[in-house]
Amino acid sequence: MNNKGFSLPELLAVIVLIAMIALITTPIVLNVIEDSSEDVFMDNALSLSKAADNYYTSLTLTSDTKLPILITFDNKKETNKYINNTTKQCETSNERILEYGGQNPDTGNIYIDNNGNIYIAIFDKESNKCAIKNPGDKTVTITNDSIEECKLDYDPCETY
């Protein structure tokens, strides 16, 4: 009788080897995914910072200034609150003010004052991280602040 196939011990040995490989590689793959989502968030935050700087620079060349401005993100939707210096009125809009690549952050704020100082506090739900930038900072800092702690308390209409 010619038996073609694997015996039960051989099959069990292969299953054990596959399980061991899965146990070793799963945490590594999960760490790579987590690190990449944090890197994407950092890139978006840097892009927003540069866009805010470009926005202020472009306003110095025009008379249609909208400063100070608070750009608020809520569930990736942008709302802007600013003083229109032509009409001297507080206005709100949903237009995209900043020109940048990438997606809107989940929540947070960007505040640009009349002197070009830029404050950023944005939160990413996927990586559960907060990106902070204050005037004078060379780069954005990623923190473990909670979504409640990751916000700015500036209102351009009250400070004007």
Image (cartoon, rainbow, N blue to C red):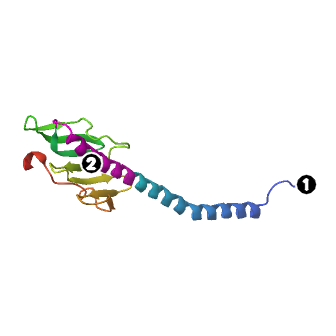
Q: Where, by quadrant of the figure, is residue 8 drawn?
A: bottom right
Q: Residue shown at 30%/60% (left/top)?
A: 138
| Sequence-earlier tag: 2 or 1 | 1
Whether residue 126 is visible here, answered yes or no, is no
Q: Is residue 146 above or below residue 102?
A: below
Q: Residue shown at 25%/39% (left/top)?
A: 97
Q: Give the SS element for disc 2.
A: helix
Camera-nearest residue between 5 and 156: 156
Q: Residues within 10 Å of mark 1 (few under 14, many from 20)?
A: few
Residue farthest along the right direction in this orientation: 1
Whether residue 131 is visible here, answered yes or no, is yes
Give the residues drawn in magenta, as a range: 41-64
Which amino acid, mark 2? Asp
Q: Residue 31: give x, y in percent of width and height.
A: 48, 60
Residue farthest along the front direction in this orientation: 61
Camera-nearest residue between 108 and 116: 116
Q: Give the SS element for disc 1.
A: loop
Q: Any mark on residue 89, and which? A: none
User: Which residue is labeled 1 in the image?
Assistant: 2
Q: Is residue 132 magenta?
A: no
Q: Residue 149: give x, y in percent of width and height.
A: 23, 59
Q: Any mark on residue 53, and which? A: 2
Q: CA distance from mark 2 to mark 1?
A: 78 Å
Camera-nearest residue between 52 and 74: 52
Q: Residue 56: give x, y in percent of width and height.
A: 22, 45
Q: Is residue 56 magenta?
A: yes
Q: Residue shown at 75%/64% (left/top)?
A: 9
